[in-house]
Amino acid sequence: MITISAIRHVPLSEDAALSFGQTLEIRLRTRAGEPLEVSLFYGDRVSMTDPIPVTQVKMKRIGCDGVSDIYGTCVHSPYTRFCYYFRICEKEGSGDPLVIYYSEHGFDPEPTTDRTQFFQYPYLRREDLPGAPVWGKDTLLYHIFPDSFADQKAGISDRSFEVTGEDGQTSRAKHGGTLRGVTENLPYIRDLGMNCIYLNPIFRSASCHKYDTIDYFAIDPCLGTKEDLVDLVKKAHELGIRVILDGVFNHSGSGFAPFLDVLEKGEASDNTSWFYHLSFPVKFEDPPNYEAFAYVKEMPKLNTSDPKVRDYCCEVGRYWIREAGIDGWRLDVANEVDHDFWRAFRKAVREEREDALLIAEIWEDATCWLQGDQFDSSMNYQFADICRDFFAKGSITAGAFDQRINRMYFRYSESTAAVQMNFLDTHDVPRFLEYCSGDQKKMAVAAAFLLLFPGIPSVFYGDELGVRGGTEETYRQIMPWKEEKGALYKVYRDLARLRQQHEILRRGNFRSIWTDERFLQMSRDLEQRSGVYGFFRTWNGQKVLILINTEKERFTLHYPEGVTAALLYGPSGEQLVGGSFSVIEID
């Protein structure tokens, strides 16, 4: 049986994406569980021969999200103009198997010979290649909330204070962390195995969180000076650590000079076009009568479609690359800013530094922001949600976890998925260990998945030392420098180093063992164990099997040949039997 209504392919999307050179990732979705054979037929859409010659490629089942089976293949095209269709066939059983052909024309019992009715990839333009810098796939990110991290080597004073500038604007610190404190602890970050720092906002602001910017061209005096940032970046680079800053261009702070001018002069201000949906007279009260981030009057929304605002913000993006040598930007509330602004910002930043990394704060599906013209990566909150349910709460089985991970991973092309910013927690959500009720073994197993899965793994400061917290007050608490580096720290350090040592763990794609027929028996064995999960990383002909056991019981699994190595995380004593490769146990 073939359920035609379940078959889906969208040209010029994650279903047909340019990967590198003239290599295309092609996917087709069918109804989950239907035993099918799927082939791709492709040819030169401007061939001098009619009908055009086509090449057949058998597609493999690469994923299942519980609704759809996902078939895929990579084609290194000899043509710059590419057209294609699919053949879908029932696997042989009783009687003659049903065969259908799927093209732009629709579904047919015979293949169309009219090339204009094929699916089209009009031209394989080099400009459409994924734009993420090469170093993105090699990144292990250490996420720091500056006010809470450090103001000295392995320490923080934990003191609140204020600094008032000559203009009367006041900046505030809650715990006293500084940029010099980050610099002093670069060796700690390097020894943990991290090679990139993401700093929450550091520009002059009224609050300790610094998301209400007063001056985008000045470092907040509570955190330090421009010279401190330059020194931090310089010394980080000397240790092989990159630095990414947080840019807040959706909104400013209420102390931002153009907004102060609007408050003072009203409609007579020359800066009314800087802000979104102003009403006059402007009322600085709760709730405000102007557009603001989440109705917070201290965060008026910027009108990023205004040329003056756009030019100002783009110059900020250039300035800190030029002046401090930063390596990229994480951009706040990216989904509330117009797309043309992000296109302009990307162009400006890339003119200053062609390999700058741009990460968007988007909590949902970020497909329309990840088309190569705006961002390289987005914050993958869905990753954290899925891990929370499986590893921390145990509210879903390994099978359900697999379906949700497949749905998440295959919503983007594999080139894009390879640089998504994955994490267990951030400055905006409770600590993952809080969801684990303090069980560090659960946290460790989740950390293993984070560090072995494709994407950019991001570790929020202190997770490796067992920081908990369910409220903003507690999950942004000070770095516990006096805590002993225990087993959890060792898990993060060892796996980060392992990832750095093996390219396959940084570049390899993802496949669940449920998609590989050679591992059918192992899959059936795992189905009996709702807390054991298995997947592959594959790269350049190599294949690593990764098994993660969330259960307390030990187990034995038999596997066939066909993988290069195995990584096993769980209670010591599990056994892998069979095959021709070495076993690396992580306990």
Image: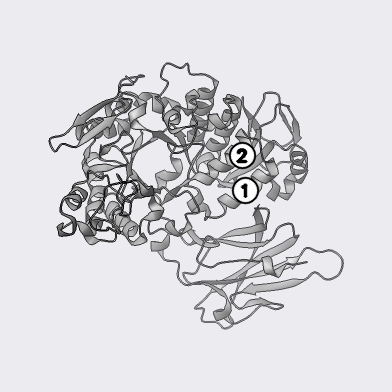
Q: Secondary structure at mark 2?
A: helix
- Amino acid beneath label 1: Arg
Using the image, determine if residue 176 lies above or below residue 286: above
Q: Nearer the viewer, residue 507 or 435?
A: 435
Q: Are marks 1 and 2 in contact (CB under 8 Å)?
A: yes
Using the image, determine if residue 281 lies above or below residue 201: below
Q: Is residue 523 left or right of residue 258?
A: right
Q: Position of residue 59 (x, y in %)?
A: 65, 60
- Amino acid beneath label 2: Asp
Mark 1 vs mark 2, CA separation in Å: 11 Å
Q: Is residue 375 visible?
A: no
Number of the label disc, if any, that sits on residue 404? 1
Q: Position of residue 448 (x, y in %)?
A: 57, 33
Q: Nearer the viewer, residue 282 or 528?
A: 282
Q: Secondary structure at mark 1?
A: helix
The residue that label 2 is drawn on is: 389
Q: Is residue 458 left or right of residue 539?
A: left
